Image (cartoon, rainbow, N blue to C red):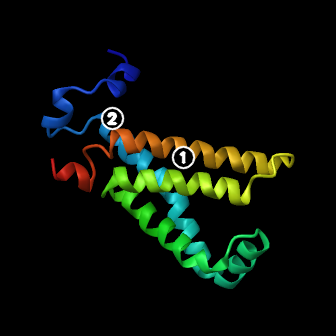
Amino acid sequence: MNAATFVSKKTNADTTSSNITLRDTAELGGRILLSSLFVLSGLSKLGAYAATMAYMSAMGVPSVLLPVVIATELFGGLAIAFGWKTRVAAFLLAGFSLVTALAFHANLADQIQMIMFMKNVSIAGAFLLLTVNGAGRISLDGKSR
């Protein structure tokens, strides 16, 4: 069995064995990497609150939404990292990523904005995979199985 097969096939041993598999480690690592962008972004917005409000206003987004944005990034990111209510958090963050792409990066004539737009769309795709597959065994969700 090669590494790709080992990672892609889920067996009864994946859910009943106490051995940590490559799949378990990859799921945890993927969640941490994916969530880090959101946690750091939420913290950054807290540290530059007034500047972020001004940026949102300049982009035509009501700055009154900033607390909701920060809470979504921080709590959603932490939920993904810890694997708590992962399917719900991932679904919400997929939507958040798509809305953010449309609100802030829709100028596709600008190459940088196009890249940022596609980054957000790609992240939404990763969140949709988490929505369907869940957090994996090394997670708070996995502990309740």
Q: CA distance from mark 2 to mark 1?
A: 21 Å
Q: Residue at x 67, y 75 (%)?
A: 62
Tell whether label 1 touches label 2 (CB within 8 Å). no
What mark, if any, has residue 124 been given in the picture?
1
Neighbours of disc 2 within 10 Å: few (<14), some (14-19), many (20+) = many
What mark, if any, has residue 23 been given in the picture?
2
Judge from the rendering whether residue 45 lies leftward or rightward of residue 142; answer left or right: right
Question: Could you say where residue 116 lies in the image, as x and y percent from the top left?
Answer: 71, 50
The amino acid pointed to by label 1 is: Ala
Question: Could you say where residue 59 lies in the image, as x and y percent from the top left?
Answer: 76, 68
Q: Residue at x 21, y 33 (%)?
A: 14
Neighbours of disc 1 within 10 Å: few (<14), some (14-19), many (20+) = many
Query: Is residue 117 positioned above or below 13 on the image?
Result: below
The label nearer to you, 2 versus 1, is 1
Considering only order in the chain, which callout, 1 or 2, is on the residue closer to the N terminus?
2
Question: Could you say where residue 119 lies in the image, as x and y percent from the top left?
Answer: 65, 46
Query: What secondary structure is found at the residue carrying circle 1?
Result: helix
Judge from the rendering whether residue 56 lies leftward or rightward of residue 74; answer left or right: right
